[in-house]
Amino acid sequence: MNFDVLHIDSEIDAKPGMGRLLADAATVIHVEPGLAERLYDGTYRIECPVPPGYKLSMNRFAKRLTARMSEQGYIFEISEADQNSSGGWIGSCIPPTMFKVFLTAWLAHVNQPRQRELFI
């Protein structure tokens, strides 16, 4: 797994703000690799709750957004998912704004203070 750098389409990489979001997400995964779940096909998945104000368009029952990445850190799928189904975009069909929406929501989710349970 090489998540020192995350990648998407090079034209989108160059859009203002995308480089910072990709770098921040790569740093989080590098520090805490368990956040990227390895799937049966060798790809990785990260996910977060659907952010407030986000309008679902591919799965009206979705409770979370997910992104799949290759071992080289290329984000190639973003989906709206619930427990039983998902719908989303793959490759060049991913709307450029979805990268920003997903990465912003995911970073906000993983940067929340985590509740720690005490065991006595």
Image: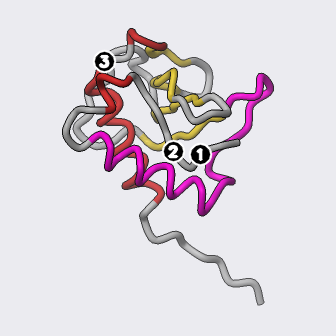
Task: Bin the neighbour count of mark 3 within 10 Å (Cα to Cα): few under 14, some 14-19, many 20 and up.
Answer: few
Q: Which residue is mark 2?
A: 5
Q: Which residue is mark 1?
A: 3
In the picture, the quarter occupied by the C terminus is: bottom right
Along the line of sight, which residue is nearer the eye, 85 or 30?
Answer: 30
Residue 7 point in image, percent of width and height: 46, 33
Residue 22 is a magenta residue: yes
Q: Residue at 34% across / 47% down in the picture?
A: 21
Mark 3 vs mark 2, CA separation in Å: 21 Å
- Magenta-drawn segment: 18-43
Q: Which residue is mark 3?
A: 95
Q: Residue at 73% across / 37% down in the picture?
A: 38
Q: Nearer the viewer, mark 3 or mark 1?
A: 1
Under mark 1, the amino acid is Phe
Q: Residue at 58% across / 30% down in the picture?
A: 69
Q: Residue at 59% across / 63% down in the picture?
A: 31
